[in-house]
Amino acid sequence: MQYFGHETDAIPLPHPSGLSTWFKLEPGKTLLHKALHLIAEHPAWRASFG
């Protein structure tokens, strides 16, 4: 995806309010696990945090 002419990646995460329950039930649990895995494996994350 392009944002202001720069190539970007977007990985959706649950809202941090604590009121959302989608990440506690399927398919939200699996989707959250996949999103966190994508972040952990992303080159920018690895370059920043090893």
Image (cartoon, rainbow, N blue to C red):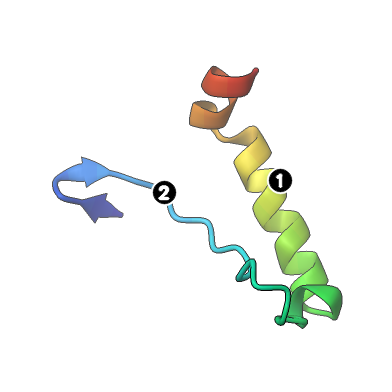
Instruction: Name the residue type under label 1.
Output: His
Q: In which quarter of the image is the C terminus?
A: top right
Secondary structure of the residue carrying numbered label 1: helix
- Label pair 2/1, CB-CB below 8 angstroms: no
Q: In this view, does 21 lie to the left or right of 41?
A: right
The crowding category of the residue bearing disc 2, from other C-alpha atoms within 10 Å (few below 14, some 14 to 19, many at least 20), is few
Q: In this view, does 11 lie to the left or right of 7?
A: right
Q: Residue at x 21, y 42 (%)?
A: 6
Q: Which residue is drawn at 30% across and 54% down?
A: 1
How far across and how far down the image is residue 17, in percent? 65, 72
State the residue position of label 1.
37
How far across and how far down the image is residue 9, in percent? 41, 49
Instruction: State whether residue 4 is above or below residue 50.
Output: below
Q: Which residue is drawn at 15% across and 50% down?
A: 4
State the residue position of label 2.
9
The crowding category of the residue bearing disc 1, from other C-alpha atoms within 10 Å (few below 14, some 14 to 19, many at least 20), is few
Q: Which residue is drawn at 65% across and 55% down?
A: 35
Instruction: State whether residue 12 is above or below residue 9.
Output: below
Quadrant of res 15: bottom right
How far across and how far down the image is residue 11, in percent? 52, 56
Q: State how far apart marks 2 and 1 are (Cα).
A: 14 Å
Instruction: State whether residue 38 is above or below residue 35.
Output: above
Q: In this view, does 6 lie to the left or right of 36?
A: left
Badge 2 or badge 1: first in the primary sequence = 2
Instruction: Name the residue type under label 2.
Output: Asp
Secondary structure of the residue carrying numbered label 2: loop
Q: In this view, does 29 lie to the left or right of 1?
A: right
